[in-house]
């Protein structure tokens, strides 16, 4: 009989611990290599199918579009917001944009001529439009003077019939930054418009970002629209709120919009954002909560304290007007609204009745008082009828979908305090001395007592 020879297992495989250790080592090395070559530096992060990888625009090094980013210390791969499949999102938004009945009834607007773009109506006249109970009502919503842009820009704006992403730089206050993470279909279905004034245009010429002899300007994805702002308001900030809040009128055939302050860079495809924050939430509008404040009066006090608006008397008058007419601090009675103060640097809208009405009413308040839009936000939202379906998302979502940069550094000069109507306002003794609100109205006193009581309870 032959002798049976036993096959011996190699020593390497006799130790389970050694096998597991080697498997762990190779897995770790693979994941480290994957992350090092991944453009997002994230492991298995979802993104649009066939994303655009090549740079959208090459800036000269002197422009410094990525200087002075404000870091949030949030891990770039953790996601507090869910995004659906890109292909499904493109199809759904396309179907919505071709279904005009989804955006009815349409708001009707007051026509006519006035000395200012918005008509600068008296307080009670503005408030009379808050209750929109009849589709025959014509709401004042700017455009009582012509919005001064070229005919070719106006035609391009009216031709945008899907999603529009809008921004503005006046007084050369920011840089033009390209969005990141766009899907291959996004530039087909989405328009990008940047509104600028002549001062900003001269800066673009100096950096050779656009040719001086071109009738139309473009920087990367952004179509640059020069606004002849000397025909509007003297205050650049007030000119900026026209595209910020009247985007539905500047782009009358668009169905959704994203407003993004020029200090921000968009890091997520706009179609994914509209779908995730507006469409899937059945919202008229989506906006981030403020990172620090909950009550309107907190924002008003900070505005006065940090001189975000120089006319302290005007701020006090605004708050007292709102208190007399029913402004209340935030409480759980206001739910589902989770705060009274937004971070309005990013606004996503469905161009339907609720969002359009809110935008018109708030714009009128900005012209009536000042362009600090957070001050009138809750008052308009709480007083308007029908109610606004609002998605106020968490700060963590905001930090995930945009990167914030500091404004351009400017030399100090003879800076004038400008009123919302465009006139120059004189500095008062009160604002020079301490910059605090002085509120004598009993309604505001009750507001403060309730606010402080809530914050200490």
Image (spheres, helix red, strand yellow):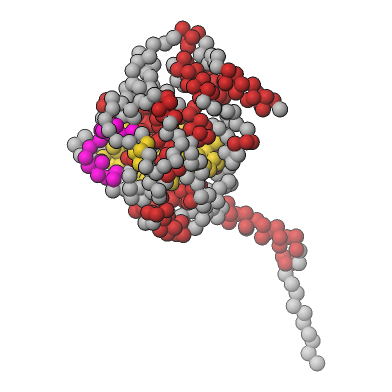
**Extent of the magenta region:** 142-158
Q: Could you tell whether 27 is left or right of 261 in the image?
A: right
Hey, which quadrant is residue 414 in on the image? top left
Image position of 87 with respect to 441: above or below:
below
Image position of 319 with respect to 431: above or below:
below
- Image location (x, y in percent) of residue 13: 72, 67
- For the question of whether residue 240 can be seen, the reply is yes
Q: Which of these two is toward me, 390 or 129?
A: 129
- For the question of whether residue 243 can be seen, the reply is no
The question of residue 396 being in magenta is answered with no
Q: Could you tell whether 166 is left or right of 398 in the image?
A: left
What residue sits 79% from the left and 86% below the top?
3
What residue sits 52% from the left and 38% below the top?
288
Q: Which of these two is toward me, 363 or 1?
A: 363
Q: Residue furthest bottom?
A: 1
Q: Could you tell whether 359 is left or right of 230 in the image?
A: right
Where, quadrant-wise, is the N terminus in this rendering? bottom right
- Image location (x, y in percent) of residue 21: 70, 57
- Image location (x, y in percent) of residue 192: 35, 44
Image position of 48 with respect to 164: above or below:
below
Q: How many marks?
A: 0
What residue sits 68% from the left and 59% below the top?
22
Image position of 341 with respect to 350: above or below:
above
Hey, which quadrant is residue 250 in on the image? top left
What residue sits 72% from the left and 69% below the top?
10
- Image location (x, y in percent) of residue 107: 38, 43
Where, quadrant-wise, is the C terminus in this rendering? top right
């Amino acid at each position: 009989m032959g002798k049976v020879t036993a096959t011996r297992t190699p020593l390497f495989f006799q130790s389970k611990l050694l096998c597991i250790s080697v498997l762990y080592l190779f897995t770790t090395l693979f994941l480290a290599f994957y992350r090092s070559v991944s453009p997002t530096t994230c492991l298995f992060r979802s993104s649009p199918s066939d994303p655009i990888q090549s740079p959208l625009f090459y800036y000269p090094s002197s422009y410094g579009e990525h200087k002075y980013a404000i870091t949030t210390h949030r891990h770039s791969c953790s996601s507090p917001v869910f995004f659906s499949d890109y292909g499904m999102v493109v199809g759904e938004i396309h179907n919505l944009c071709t279904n005009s009945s989804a955006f009815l009834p349409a708001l009707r607007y007051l026509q006519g001529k006035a000395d200012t773009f918005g008509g600068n109506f008296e307080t009670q006249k503005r408030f009379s439009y808050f209750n929109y109970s009849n589709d025959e009502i014509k709401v004042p919503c700017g455009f009582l003077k012509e919005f001064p842009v070229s005919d070719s820009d106006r035609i391009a704006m009216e031709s945008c019939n899907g999603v529009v992403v809008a921004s503005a730089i006046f007084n050369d206050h920011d840089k033009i930054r390209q969005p990141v993470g766009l899907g291959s279909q996004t530039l087909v279905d989405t328009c990008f418009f940047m509104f600028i004034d002549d001062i900003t245009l001269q800066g673009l010429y100096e950096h050779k970002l656009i040719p001086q002899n071109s009738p139309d300007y473009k920087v990367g994805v952004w179509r640059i629209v020069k606004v002849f702002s000397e025909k509007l308001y003297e205050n650049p900030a007030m000119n900026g709120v026209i595209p910020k809040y009247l985007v539905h009128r500047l782009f009358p055939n668009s169905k959704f919009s994203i407003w993004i302050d020029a200090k921000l860079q968009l890091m997520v495809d706009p179609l994914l954002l509209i779908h995730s924050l507006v469409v899937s939430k059945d919202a008229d509008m989506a906006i981030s909560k403020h990172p620090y404040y909950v009550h309107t009066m907190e924002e008003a006090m900070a505005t006065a304290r940090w001189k975000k608006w120089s006319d302290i008397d005007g701020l006090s008058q605004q708050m007292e007007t709102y208190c007399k007419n029913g402004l209340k601090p935030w409480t759980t009675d206001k739910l589902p609204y989770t705060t009274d103060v937004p971070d309005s640097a990013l606004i996503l809208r469905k161009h339907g009745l609720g969002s359009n009405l809110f935008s018109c009413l708030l714009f009128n308040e900005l012209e009536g008082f000042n362009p600090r839009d957070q001050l009138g936000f809750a008052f308009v939202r709480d007083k308007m009828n029908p109610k606004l379906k609002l998605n106020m998302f968490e700060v963590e979502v905001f930090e995930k979908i945009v990167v914030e940069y500091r404004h351009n550094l400017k030399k100090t000069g003879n800076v004038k305090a400008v009123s919302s109507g465009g006139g120059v306002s004189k500095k008062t003794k009160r604002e020079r001395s301490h910059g605090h609100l002085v509120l004598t109205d009993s309604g505001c006193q009750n507001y403060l007592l309730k606010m402080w009581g809530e914050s200490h309870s």
